[in-house]
Image (spheres, grey):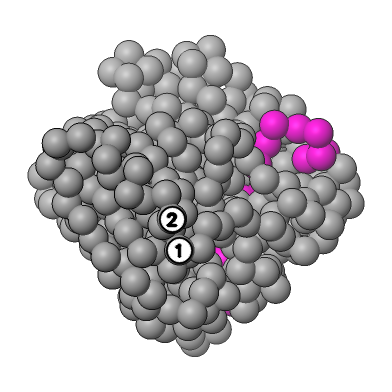
Amino acid sequence: MKNIAIIHIKTLVQVEQVARTWVAGADMANVDCINAAYLILKDSLIHDFGKMTEWENAYKLLGNQEVEIIDATGKLVYPTFADSHTHLVYAGSREIEYMDKIRGLSYEEIAKRGGGILNSAKRLHEASEQQLFDESVERVYEIMRMGTGAVEIKSGYGLNTADELKMLRVIRRLKGETLITIKSTFLGAHALPLEYKGKQEEYVDMVINEMIPLVASEELADYVDVFCDKGFFTPFDTERILMAGLKYGLKPKIHANELDFSGGVQVGVKYDALSVDHLEFIGDDEIKTLLNSKTMPTVLPGAAFFLGMQYSPVRKMMQAGLPIALASDFNPGSSPSGNMHLISAMGSILYKMLPQEVIHATTINGAYTMELSHSHGSICKGKAASVFITKPIPGIEFFPYAYGSNLIDTVFVNGVRV
């Protein structure tokens, strides 16, 4: 693999000498950067970086190795985004429901009419595995071109054993046939199928006794997730599923508190969930529970914006000392975009996060929730050579400010130009 040297970088963003696990509280307002910098990518890893005054010596140390040199004058270089919550494997789209939403129907009302997740489940059931892969691989390359280098993808539009396994096999194939780093999450408890109306316990039993053992036997998932919220699955259901997942080595991640105070945060922390996601409804009890836990509060601005929901109290959480991750929630019903630049802008515009706070939330903190702190989320020697070069821009403040412009010029994922 060719060595790549990016030189005359205006600002090299989010640099670390020693990889951190996450960044929390007041520390999120500070990002380490190097002005007038170089960066060397070698053998799919970050090999070296520093100030341009040190470049000649660094170049000499490469010896006679072939080096592609990229001049980044006036440009910034970032680690690629770590998008820790998506549902990008799906069939078709749901713009008709979007029209229902415009007419005033709520997310819950659309779901009760057989829309929402159940609509996607029907479309997925009718799609072949190859069709599902073909649609999904286009989305994967789309998000890579927009600067994402690591992504979590959930199942959850199957809602029966065969279709959940079909989704997870597509995710496994995406892992093997694309450049991006992918983590897979089993979300059989995403919604209650119509045929189980009034029989929720039976469906949870099937998730536990049939789906999870088969998912584990084929090694199709890294994590297990539950939609623990009003109108979906209860904390008791969630505990049962998480315990079963842990028995098979699937670590928990939770959809929590999007629609109400659901108890999902408390359940997630109890079972050491890597993250609790959505969090539109967060109070003092939830913040206290999250403090001193290993669980990352993850906010999904795209969904709250698209659905017209209240916004999570991100500033209050950070002031309490918590870390925050931001993810796209890329899915056909409530956040049909995997554009993490847009999510960065929403972090600043809608949640009043500083550009520095947004950088941590979309890189290192997102990497943590996928157990990738060692390999992604910052410019650090030995981490994956997954970085993007911006177009010429004034500085990091401009990135979330110019929310509608395509500011990304070049993307490398695991050392390969996308």
Q: Position of residue 396 (x, y in %)?
A: 53, 70
Q: Is residue 26 left or right of residue 210?
A: right
Q: Position of residue 169 (x, y in %)?
A: 23, 33
Can residue 387 be seen here? The reply is yes
Which of the two discs, 2 and 1, labels the residue nearer the N terminus?
1
Can you identify the residue that label 2 sits on? 53
Q: Is residue 163 left or right of residue 332?
A: left
| Residue 224 vs residue 152, the one in the foreground | 152
Marks 2 and 1 close (CB-CB < 8 Å):
yes
Judged from the image, the secondary structure of the residue bearing numbered disc 2 is helix
Q: Is residue 134 left or right of residue 230?
A: left
Can residue 76 be seen here? The reply is no
Give the residue at x 43% y 55%.
53
Q: Residues within 10 Å of mark 1 (few under 14, many from 20)?
A: many
Can you identify the residue that label 1 sits on? 36
Q: CA distance from mark 2 to mark 1?
A: 8 Å
